[in-house]
Amino acid sequence: MYIAAVGATAGIVVIGDEILSGKFADENAAFLIGELRSLGVDLRRISVIPDDLDDIADTVVRFSGKFTYVFTSGGVGPTHDDLTMAGIARGFGTRVVQAPELEAKVRAYWGEKLAPANLRLAQVPEGAELVYGDAVWPVACYRNVYILPGVPALFRRKFLEIRERFRTVPVVVARVYAGGEEGVLAPELDAVVAAFPGVKIGSYPRFEEKDFRVLLTVEGVDGGVVREAVEELRRRLRELVVRVQLPE
């Protein structure tokens, strides 16, 4: 079994002129945000970039050096603007090669209807690993970069096939619904943040709610510490606490 790194971080690189031009709304990063959260992977950054070799090369290499995992979305296919494989190869100083294992799958899938351009689907950066889940088609991975297609249905399917590779300690989240303005709450939040460095506290004003004014989130990997931090918030905020939602 593949065990993900504890404290793992991730970056997402969405590649495609169609996203930046507004022709299509990105669905893949939004999907992956929730998946990584449930797996306990700390998503640190999302970048949306054009179909440009140098931009792909620069962004992916930078992300690879910063984060445990990098997930790319888009630019994988048989057409002229599918540049992700070439961009990643350029960034890491290698070349694009035809993977015999993938080529055999492409030829078997299309049979006599195979168009020459479809063979581009068998191209990967030299040295890439083919990561299999339960499906026939693997995900290409170069170092810590997982290369996924841009079509949302395919993106989701391919990620779900390999998602357990990334499971680590999940984040525990509690919610405190508070009255009062953020300025009133801020000194008490600062005190709790200082007392519990192992948790993160978020403060989110809500103007449309009738029974509370601010949603506070308390999160961390240790459920006991999260509960202690919540109790300290209760003690400090007193009557300003409307209700509390603890993790199960």
Image (tube, grey):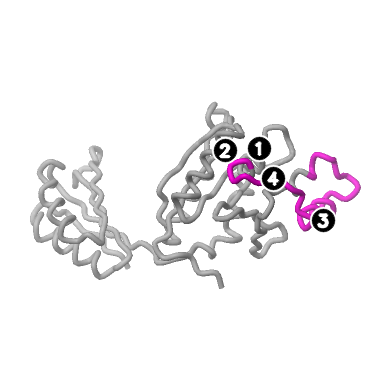
- For the N terminus, the image quarter is bottom right
| 138 on left or right of 173 | right
Determine the CA span between mark 2 and mark 1.
Answer: 8 Å
Which amino acid type corresponds to the residue marked 2 in the rendered image? Ile
Residue that numbered label 4 is attached to? 95
| 173 on left or right of 124 | left
- Of marks 4 and 3, the one in the foreground: 4
Q: Earlier in the sequence, mark 4 or mark 2?
A: 2
- Of marks 4 and 2, the one in the foreground: 4
Determine the CA span between mark 4 and mark 3.
Answer: 20 Å
Front in this rendered view, residue 59 or 179: 59
Residue 102 found in image quarter = bottom right
Front in this rendered view, residue 147 or 40: 147
Q: Position of residue 76 (x, y in %)?
A: 66, 42
Q: Is residue 206 above or below residue 144?
A: above
Which circle marks residue 56 in the picture? 2
